[in-house]
Amino acid sequence: MLIQSDHIIKWMELVNDQIDRQKDYLTQLDQAIGDGDHGINMNRGFKEVIHKIHQTTYDDIGKLLQDIGMVLLSKVGGASGPLYGTAFIKAGQVLKGKQEITINELGQAFQESVNGIKLRGKSQIGDKTMLDVWEPVTMYIQQNENTLNIRELVSYAREQMENTKELEAKKGRASFLGKRSIGHLDPGAVSSFILFETLCSILLEENLIKK
């Protein structure tokens, strides 16, 4: 079975549930090195996403992703809104007109998301941002598309998230702390891990890829 709009909607519902459960944790992470509102902003944004996508019938996966991106762009505050919004909008542009997609096409879409995050955030891998999860996970998907093991992908994504703890922040408010940012997880990397972990749950649950 290929990935269809209904699977993307289930993914967003699961993301919303997880962000809602972990919003206080995300906010605590952000209070340590950032603005202190990441969990609150992400929770508000994904609730708005669910409201939006439940009001419309989607055959076009690209249109669905672009709508998700536009909601995140307008409803999530701080730097996270533009970055997450850009990621989904760019993915949507790649998948425009598609009613179902393969893992290969999903990887291509995420690659455009990564390009968009880099351009929007003027960031690179190692800067202690969400990109430190997005870029390696996207590369992993593209390099292992034919033999992708979902549980290994989740472990790999978690490892990338945890690696941000030892990085010195180069972007955003956290960069003001310099070396004092070392020892803290990046909140955007944690919410990005939630995004990919929930995607993997849907891929397994719906039997969309070899386990």
Image (tube, rainbow, N blue to C red):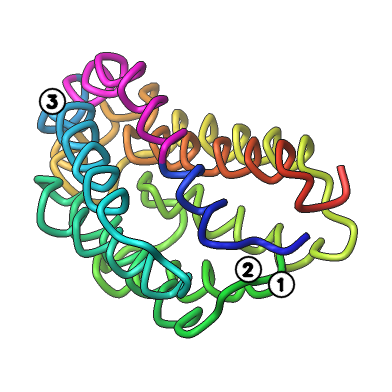
Q: Quadrant of the C terminus?
A: top right
| Magenta highlight on residue 14 | yes
Q: Which label number is shown at residue 107?
A: 2
Q: Which residue does the image show at 48% across and 82% down from the upper left?
A: 94
Could you tell me if the residues under marks 2 and 1 are in contact, i.e. CB atoms within 8 Å?
yes
What secondary structure is found at the residue carrying circle 1? helix
Amino acid type shown at disc 1? Asn
Q: Which residue does the image show at 60% across and 56% down from the upper left?
A: 136
Label 2 to label 1: alpha-carbon separation: 5 Å
Q: Earlier in the sequence, mark 2 or mark 3?
A: 3
What secondary structure is found at the residue carrying circle 2? helix
Quickly name the residue at label 1.
Answer: 104
Could you tell me if the residues under marks 3 and 1 are in contact, i.e. CB atoms within 8 Å?
no
Q: Could you classify mark 1 by the number of other residues whose Cα lies within 10 Å: few (under 14), some (14-19), or many (20 or more)?
A: some
In the image: residue 131, left or right of residue 176: right
Q: Which residue does the image show at 42% across and 44% down from the upper left?
A: 12
Q: In terms of depth relative to the viewer, which is nearer, 178 or 197?
A: 197
Magenta residues, dominant SS class:
helix
Task: Specify the quadrant of the image occupied by residue 181.
Answer: top left
Marks 3 and 1: which is nearer the front? 1
Amino acid type shown at disc 2? Gly
Q: Which residues are magenta?
A: 13-31
Q: Quadrant of the N terminus?
A: bottom right
Decide: is 74 above or below 173.
Answer: below
